[in-house]
């Protein structure tokens, strides 16, 4: 059982790591577009932005139901990041107990 469960938990942890990077890239790209550092009319930028939105927004929308905006500041990406870290800590402890 452990020979299947440990690699599966490690794959889930790596997938969560990749998702953290997607969230970070999404946040940075949104800042760059907001401050007119990059042109949102560029086809490549628009395509990347839409792809990232499709991956990140459904999760953030669920978090926004419970956490309101603080003025003009959206803290849902921070909460998502903390939730991912929490899940990874739990996975790490489970793996440590199984070994």
Image (spheres, rainbow, N blue to C red):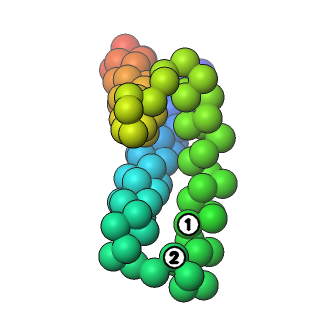
Residue 75 sits in which quadrant?
A: top left
Dot 1 lies on which element? helix
Residue at far top of view: 97
x then y, percent, for residue 19: 48, 48
Mark 2 near mark 1, Cβ–Cβ under 8 Å?
Answer: yes
Q: Residue at x 56, y 37 (%)?
A: 60
Q: Residue at x 62, y 64 (%)?
A: 51
Few, some or many residues within 10 Å of mark 1 (<14, 14–19, 20+)? some
Of the 4 image quadrants, the one containing the C terminus is top left
Instruction: In this rendered view, identify the residue nearer to me: 14 or 34.
Output: 34
Residue 44 sits in which quadrant?
A: bottom right
Few, some or many residues within 10 Å of mark 2 (<14, 14–19, 20+)? some
Task: First in sequence, mark 2 or 1: give its number.
Answer: 2
Mark 2 sits on what residue?
Answer: 40
x then y, percent, for residue 94: 42, 18
Q: Residue at x 42, y 68 (%)?
A: 33
Mark 1 sits on what residue?
Answer: 49
């Amino acid at each position: 059982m452990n020979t299947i469960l440990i690699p599966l938990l490690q794959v889930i942890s790596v997938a969560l790591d990749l998702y953290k990077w997607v969230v970070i890239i999404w946040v940075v790209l949104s800042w760059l577009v907001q401050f007119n550092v990059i042109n949102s009319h560029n086809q490549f930028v628009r395509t990347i932005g839409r792809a990232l939105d499709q991956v990140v927004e459904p999760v953030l929308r669920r978090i926004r139901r419970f956490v309101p905006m603080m003025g003009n500041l959206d803290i849902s990406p921070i909460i998502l990041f903390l939730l991912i870290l929490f899940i990874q800590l739990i996975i790490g402890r489970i793996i440590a107990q199984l070994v």
